[in-house]
Image (spheres, rainbow, N blue to C red):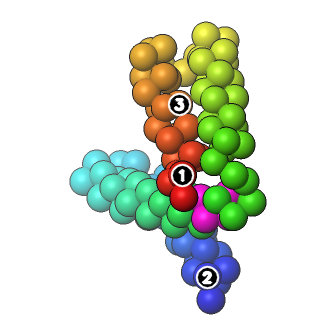
Amino acid sequence: MEGLEGDTEHAIADQLINEIKASEQDEDLWNAKVKVLAELVEHHIEEEEGELSKEIRKEFDAETRVQIGEDYTNLLLHHSGESNIALTKTNNQSQANMHRNAMAGSRN
């Protein structure tokens, strides 16, 4: 069932994107559809992150998860200076720390 739910969420997101493109002349309608799309995507990401975190905890010990988080942090910091992303180094560090902490999870 989970696979079907994800497929359905993807289909709805695709439909909303098409509707957003078609509603550019009506600002209120456009804003409403963009808000719904953002909420749908946020929900979908949270579900996938939760599933991924469980799998990572099963597959890797705490030390390895911390190392993966540190490697990811370094990649974020390295690439932030080379891209056009409008994030400051501080924001990147904060975001990377959140990812590192999520990867480490509980030490149990």
Mark 3 neighbour class, 10 Å CA radius: few under 14, some 14 to 19, many 20 or more = many
Where residue 40 appears, as percent x and y from the top left, is: 44, 64
Residue at image position (63%, 48%) is: 62
Viewer-side label of 2, 1: 1
- Measure the alpha-carbon separation of dots 2 and 3: 29 Å
Q: Amino acid at mark 3?
A: Ala
Extent of the magenta region: 52-56
- For residue 26, say whether it is visible: no
Residue situated furthest top in the rendering: 81
Residue situated furthest left in the rendering: 28
Please give the residue where the numbered disc 2 appears in the rendered image.
Answer: 2
- Measure the alpha-carbon separation of dots 2 and 1: 28 Å
Q: Say whether residue 55 is magenta.
A: yes
Where residue 104 appears, as percent x and y from the top left, is: 57, 46
Please give the residue where the numbered disc 1 appears in the rendered image.
Answer: 107
Q: Amino acid at mark 2?
A: Glu
- For residue 94, say whether it is visible: yes
SS majority, magenta: helix
Viewer-side label of 2, 3: 3
Residue at image position (69%, 52%) is: 61
Please give the residue where the numbered disc 3 appears in the rendered image.
Answer: 96
Where residue 55 appears, as percent x and y from the top left, is: 68, 64
Mark 1 neighbour class, 10 Å CA radius: few under 14, some 14 to 19, many 20 or more = few
